[in-house]
Image (cartoon, rainbow, N blue to C red):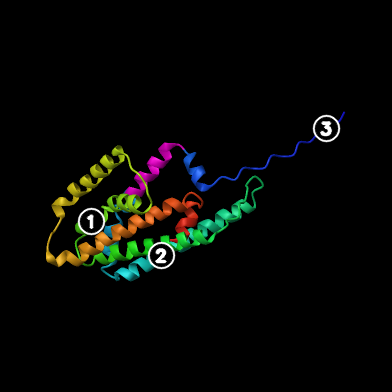
């Protein structure tokens, strides 16, 4: 009697984008709500921090704290995968276009936080939040003009409803005046940078994991 050993089939490499698409839609929806909930407090916490620190110092501390936490988490994950016999380690390869996109994302994200934090020193929290929340509008315009992206009517209606809801929520606390012009302009500029950042992340997410992208931020 002969025993024939079949070679084990190689594991198929999956990109982070493909893995994310394979997850249930409910996980994406819950993650979205958690992200919105966390971001809703960002302006308030930045404003509180700026009572003791300036906008640049506030954002600098945000970066190094996040880098330490994400770095330790990524190190723990790497060590766990190395000691696991079932895991498949995939070495990350960076092309020149990947590096350009990663650096562009870092610049856009840093500019978003700095201009938003600066705007909070020049205008009210309501004004800054309201104007920063027009990011979907700039994302759509930039994607359509420069990336040849197309959007159906349902998406456009949803965007209008979302922006209108943000305006109605913050309308009562909105202050219009020449004193707020600098802060309001910075808040709008932060929305433009945020839109550029999101479009760049969309391209990077097809290849890189969320942890890798956040570390580059």
- Mark earlier in primary sequence (2, 1): 2
| Badge 2 density bin: few <14, some 14–19, many ≥20, Cα 10 Å | some
Horizontal side, residue 46 vs residue 16: left or right: left
User: Magenta region, mostly helix, strand or loop?
Assistant: helix
Horizontal side, residue 174 vs residue 134: left or right: left
User: Residue 11 or 75: which is nearer the viewer?
Assistant: 11
Task: Check residue 26 for magenta coloring.
Answer: yes
User: Residue 79 or 119: which is nearer the viewer?
Assistant: 119
Task: Residue 127: name its quadrant.
Answer: bottom left
User: Measured along the vertical axis of the image, is residue 108 above or below residue 136?
Assistant: below
Residue 59, which numbered label? none
Residue extent of the magenta highlight? 24-36
Instruction: Report which residue position mark 3 lands on.
Output: 3
- Mark earlier in primary sequence (3, 1): 3
Horizontal side, residue 153 vs residue 173: left or right: right
Instruction: Report which residue position mark 2 lands on.
Output: 63
Instruction: Residue at 38% x, 68% y: name it.
Output: 60
């Amino acid at each position: 009697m002969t025993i024939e050993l079949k070679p084990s089939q190689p594991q198929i490499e999956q990109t982070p984008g493909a893995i994310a698409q394979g997850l249930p839609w409910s996980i994406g929806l819950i993650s979205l709500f958690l992200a919105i909930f966390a971001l809703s407090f960002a302006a308030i916490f930045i404003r509180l921090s700026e009572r003791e620190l300036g906008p640049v110092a506030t954002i600098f501390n945000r970066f190094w704290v996040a880098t330490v936490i994400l770095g330790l988490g990524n190190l723990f994950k790497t060590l766990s995968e190395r000691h696991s016999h079932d895991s498949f380690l995939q070495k990350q390869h960076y092309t020149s276009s990947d590096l350009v996109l990663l650096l562009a994302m870092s610049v856009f994200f840093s500019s978003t936080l700095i201009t938003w934090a600066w705007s909070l020193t020049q205008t009210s929290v309501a004004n800054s939040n309201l104007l920063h929340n027009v990011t979907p509008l700039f994302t759509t315009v930039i994607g359509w003009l420069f990336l040849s992206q197309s959007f159906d009517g349902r998406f456009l209606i949803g965007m209008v409803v979302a922006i209108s809801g943000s305006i109605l929520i913050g309308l009562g606390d909105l202050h219009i005046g020449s004193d707020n012009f600098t802060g309001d302009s910075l808040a709008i500029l932060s929305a433009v940078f945020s839109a550029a950042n999101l479009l760049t992340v969309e391209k990077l997410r097809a290849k890189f994991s969320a942890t890798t992208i956040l570390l580059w931020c």
